[in-house]
Image: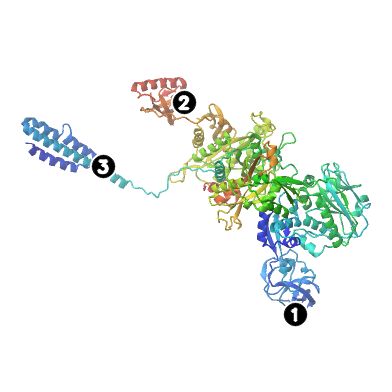
Amino acid sequence: MRVSLKWLREYVDPRLAPEELAHRLTMAGLAVDAIARTGDWGADIRVGEVVAVEPHPGADWLRLATVGVGGEERHRVVCGAPNLAVGQRVAFATVGARVRDGHTGKQSVLKPAVIRGVESAGMVLSERELGLSDEHEGILVLPADAPLGEPLAGVLGDVVFELSVTANRADWLSVLGIAREVAALTGEALREPSLTYEAAGPAIKGRASVEIQAKDLCRRYVATVITGIKHGPAPQWMQERLIALGQRPISNVVDVTNYVMLELGQPLHAFDYDRIANHHIIVRRGEDEEAFQTLDGEARTLTRDMLAIADEAGPVALAGVIGGLESEVTAKTSNILLESATFLGASVRRTSMALKARSEASLRFEKGLPPDLAMVASQRATKLLVEVCGGTAMAGCIDVYPGKQRELRVEVTRERIARVIGIDPPATKVRAVLGGLGFSARWIPPDRYVVRVPYWRPDVRIADDVIEEVARSIGYDEVPTKALEGAIPAPIVQPLRELRERARDLLVEAGMQEVITYSTTTMEALARVMPAEDLAIYPPYRILNPISAEHEYLRPTLRASLLQTLASNLRYQDGAVAIFETARVYERADLRAAVAGRPPGEEALPLEREQATGAVSGRRLDRWGRPSESPMDFFEAKAYVESLLRGCNVAGEYVPLNEFGMVPGRTAEVRVDGVRVGVIGQVHPEVAAAFDIEQEAYIFEITLDALLLLVGGVRQLAPASRFPAVEQDLALVVARDTPAAGVQRAIEASPLVSEARVFDVYTGDQVPAGKKSLAFAVRYQSADHTLTDEEVAKAQRKLLERLRREFDAELRGG
Amino acid sequence: MPNDTLLPLRSEAMRALAAAGESAALDAWRIEYLGRKGRLTGVLRGLSELSIDERKAAGAAANALKLELESAFEERSEALRRAALAASIETGQIDVTLPARPHPRGALHPVTQTLRRILDAFRSLGFSVVEGPEVELDYYNFEALRIPADHPARDMWDTMWVDYDADGRRPLLLRTHTSPGQIRIMEQHAPPIRVAVPGRAYRVEATDTTHEWMMTQVEVLAVDEGISLAHMKGTLLDVMRRVLGPERRIRLNCSYFPFVEPGAEVAVDCFVCNGAGCATCHHSGWIEMMGAGMVHPEILDKMGIDSSRFTGFAAGMGVERLAMQIYGVADIRDFYQNDLRMLQQF
């Protein structure tokens, strides 16, 4: 909503600088987004009068204008405007004025010039040269009463406020509504516009009628009839006000309806009285498939949900949205039926959105207009149609008002005011601020007010609504700050959330960089990391109105997003890149069993799982921080997973796995206590290439929901043994495909062994074909005594026997 | 006898000790002079041929010499040890200005860091941190918050809809704010309630330097007996100070959200210019931080919380906006481009 200070001053004089006024309005809830000034022209642009026009001796299309600017001062200038005429009041610039170029729009200082041999020291200006609009066909012609010689700034200058009106305040979508707020804020008197007019015509009764069939969608319908309209442009003052608020003047009748809508907030519609069958208006629901041509020329199809204004032949308008082509007011129209009605906001909103025809009118209706306003606006607009369009109003009006309600009185206790805003203002203050806003508050001793709500505030219904009025009028600044009192509630703990935050910290501590990627992806990217049959059986959720095709699907995995992020970083990173994200993935609800503990009615929601996914690639850094020759590998990625699992007090097992999009033999399922919690491995080079990754890349994916079930409690201290350990190295020859972890577990499970660590893997000449050598550093230690050589020797013998039995392992060189 | 034997032995031993320049030579000296089969022992063994008086005198002299040699030995070894240490320190000098060994360094995303600052502040005031689903029912995102279908306030949140419709009446959507968290908490918990609900939210939004279609938000809810707008002001002021510095001030102006009454927008004085006006605050001295207000009594009643007894406040804030201010990020879209050259600065 825009409002011009000039128009505002018609109803209230704020006596404040525009910036201060804007600040106060913003604090009170009517946010001023911008202040625009027109007419910062300086003293060298004044109101002039064209006193003579002569032909230019050197050019047919130029003329010589003599312009007076008051007193004896005359200037003769060359002018090319076709609309120049003697007697016009015009905007005249003398040398030194800042004017815009009529073609380029650039501002410059006006200098004397010689045009086709004639000296010209001044200029009659167009709107474009004044920076008012793009109009440059002719000069700007001012009203005949514009004061001669006065600076133009005093005549045309204005301040326009750009306002953000909240959805509850339809009344602020009007100049009068804003004026009421300004009056309340400043204490200045409000001057309401006049509603009285002379009804010189015959009585309307019997000459027009209204029937409301859809009483649920139309609370009130007021109609007046004005005959003998003289079609033409609206008066200058009205046009200027419309332009200032961003409305294009069209014709006097349309401009009056727009003017009253902007002034009072009530949209109006003017029908051609003679084109309404029997002058009988029917307010009814549309028929399904009912065809209707609106005044923009579009063919519309109605439904039962839509409210139509019809005559006996069919619809003539869509209530509150748009008029019909048939009944539109044209230059030939001489008699008008003026509609001022209260349509149900939700219905207007639904209809206007369905037809993609939202308008200034529908925006006002959908916020909910009070029925009283319909009568006020009807009177105001009828008055202006009589005065501005030369019409004759029929006496009286048609007023069908099925939705009449009792005037609202709200009881507000003093205790409630203090309870909600934390201060207890005196009754005089409460009554004064409410009175200023048009409410009337009666104090009922000992403890309450009865508040009458003015008709233009249908948003105020309950005590707390009134309390907001009190609070914002006193000013939120006056409310003190207090610390929360009372008992601190018992903490609510979400273990999955806590695990996720722990996972974040652990991966960062391990050296990974957290990234946050969009929750969405494309089918194409998903197809690279998920098998086609999975995507067919478990299709990802699709967004009906995505921001772009890149964001059409809710992701069931983070892999694609992480690989895209990896690729974009590898483009300029030579060194190691290790990134991770913890985020939700979305699994189809209709394909999963009911989950215990979810509230009823929520089966429809996707299962949102927390995943921690990492991507690792690039080259390790050397001592100097330069990318070395050695690439980041599987075990680098595994180190991050181990950091995560160890930090969660669980041990990971890694079982070779064939996984879609990963390199076989370089991929493992990550298990804890035998249960799958995720995957780690090398991205298949073809998949990597599809993401524009040309080097080895590794990813891991841990489903935190699965991990959560396995995470142990807080680890209890295991005291370190006070007795010395015996270290022995053990080189074993085993079959090449024997997993080292199994051998290690067997060693660690043996008596007296406290720890075993792999320190070498060898295949080659020194061991038979098909075999490999695994070297372990084995530590024997007892918690309660110093081991003897015999004990250790015996334990080792038993260990070797076991390894021979279980793994066919031989001592290397033994 | 003893003196003619002991005196030369002494001077010879002292000379040899002074010549011993390393620990091996020192060891050899100790064996030669002070060892069990060393020369001083040899002298003492020769004492048996002497008379008792002579033996006493000679024994005392030899013992005195032994003590003297031992102490000289200790002194010498200490001197040598110190010299060796000094030499090794001398040769072991390094250029301390050389770069450190590169350790991989990870960091949390700046949005996560900012979010944690906010949540830590609320936690310290007794708030629990809880989360809800990102894909929501219309009921939680709108209806229960007093934004029924066809309500004009729906224009405030341009919604992304999901192509799954449970029963034709409950369309799914991507939550447009974290406010559904209020409802979910009040459904399951009775007052006193203090929660902060962080998470992602999504809107159909034309993106520019200050608008993203995916955003991180924190919704806050406190419900108890005796909570007023003053408590809301106090709590939000305290949180802003914990996040942005103890000298911060806040300013509330009236605003409208269907689920609160009275409603407010909360601004904090610009921490770049301290309210004087600068580019960061668009020369207003204030930066919009959140929407807030007293929980609408109809919502409390609908959740089975007696609104005549209990009151509460709710507030919602955008984390990225705050992160932009804290880290001097000019374009909100940079956060989710995940350029490590940017992320690793934080």
Residue B27 rendering spot, x and y as whole percentages: 21, 37
Check disc 3 and report the residue beneath it.
B81
Vertical relation: A43 (above or below) A290? below
Give the labeled residue for mark 1.
A72
- Chain at numbered mark 2: A
Residue B173 position by quadrant: top right
Element marked by disc 1: loop
The residues bearing labels 3 and 2 have C-alpha atoms spaced at a distance of 48 Å
Q: Is residue A785 left or right of residue B136?
A: left
Instruction: Bin the neighbour count of mark 3 within 10 Å (Cα to Cα): few under 14, some 14-19, many 20 and up.
Output: some
Is any part of residue B135 visible from this angle?
yes
Q: Nearer the viewer, residue A34 or A232?
A: A34
Residues A146 and B166: in front is: A146
Do callouts 3 and 2 mark residues in contact (Cβ within 8 Å)?
no
Task: Report the chain holding disc 3.
Answer: B
Q: Is residue B240 above or below residue A525?
A: below
Q: Quadrant of residue A173?
A: bottom right
Residue A411: % across, % down? 73, 45
Indicate the amino acid at tag 2. Answer: Arg
Left or right: A104 as drawn, with respect to A483: right
Report whether residue A683 is seen. Answer: no
Determine the residue positioned at 37% across, 20% down: A794
Q: Which mark is residue A745?
A: 2
Element type where label 2 sits in the image: helix
Q: Amino acid at mark 1?
A: Glu
